[in-house]
Amino acid sequence: MSGHLAVVGATGAVGQEFLRVLEQRNFSYDKITFMASSRSAGKTIEFKGQDHTVIELTEKSFEGVDLSLFSAGGSRSKQYAPAAVKAGTVVVDNSSAFRMDPDVPLVVPEVNPEDCRRHQGIIANPNCSTIIMVVPVWPLHKVCPIERVVVSTYQSASGAGYQAMLELEQQTRDLLAGKPIEPKVLPHQIAFNLFSHNSRIGEHGYNEEEMKMVNETRKMFHSDDIYVTATCVRVPVMRSHTEAINMTFSKPITEDKVREILSAAPGVTVVDDREKNYFPMPIEANDGDDVLVGRIRQDISQPDGRGIDMFVSGDQLRKGAALNAVQIAELL
């Protein structure tokens, strides 16, 4: 694009990843501005060899800004995104604030790029776990409609932000040194432990993260006929989320056909070597654009041939957040 680009929440973990992705993809703009809360305003950010001073995010910050990439949290998005739109700015928002708003497109470019066309100033970036699931599930659904998805997630500390990543590192050091553990960012010890995702539990016993995967998938697939159930878990991994996905298709499909479809799918790399027991791992998804997919196999509990299992891993900060938002900006 040409014009004035703003990165909102530029000093956070996803904001910093925005900068890396923008530089690596050589995203075009005439001017760039970095915005953050008052406590980060005045800091200096180096980008493409130049120093930029972070300005304070206010409702008057968007005059002359053509496109804004938001990663400042849901409450700030709700407060400032409408002001940005009023100033003539198109907002790509990484928070949950607008995802389920019927007037706001929710977009993964490999899934539903055409939805961008109906935006009214705001386009929402889906939840990281949802993105990593739908990138490999969608190309299968297009060929043979999926009726049901059962997904279990193994979510890294990066999903809870930079401070959670630091907490995992510090707790690991403390444990190995025989020191006591005091969780501060996450609700429980994360080093050498795992626990149910740290989001609020709703009336049906599902937490918010799990319901995001359910509702966002249906919205992007434009289908209420696909049933999704999720169990989301926080694990002691620094970066990249991993998921075990079980699918029930509307008609029989073979694992070879699934492998063939995924080998040609955008945003997917098949890592599926049974002989070497070599499959997707978060350490190999780190810093990568693609979702790694493996353990592709027929579900033997579904003898009618309609069941497929697979195991996927994707970089939560990258494809799960910053990269997807920049890809949306590229579509615009």
Image (cartoon, rainbow, N blue to C red):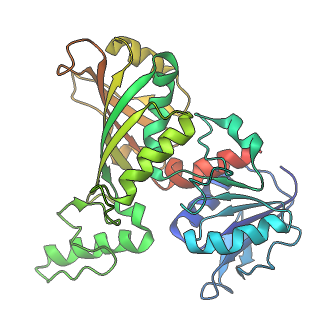
Q: What residue sits 22% from the left and 83% below the top? A: 182
Where is residue 242 shown, x and y percent of the image?
Answer: 34, 45
Q: What residue sits 81% from the left and 79% below the top? A: 60
Would you place residue 156 above or below residue 183 in this image?
above
Where is residue 163 shown, x and y percent of the image?
Answer: 41, 75
Can see residue 73?
no
112 or 274: which is nearer to us? Answer: 112
The quarter of the image holding the C terminus is: top right
Would you place residue 39 above or below residue 264 in this image?
below
147 or 64: which is nearer to us? Answer: 147
Can you tell which quarter of the image residue 62 is in? bottom right
45 or 18: which is nearer to us? Answer: 18
Can you tell which quarter of the image residue 327 is in? top right
Q: What residue sits 14% from the left and 73% below the top? A: 176
User: Is 256 left, or right, of 178 in this rendering?
Assistant: right
User: Is 301 left, or right, of 82 in this rendering?
Assistant: left
Where is residue 260 shown, x and y percent of the image?
Answer: 44, 15
Can see residue 116?
yes
329 or 25: which is nearer to us? Answer: 329
Q: What residue sits 50% from the left and 50% below the top? A: 320
Can you tell which quarter of the image residue 174 is in? bottom left
Where is residue 268 shown, x and y percent of the image?
Answer: 48, 31
Q: How many marks?
A: 0
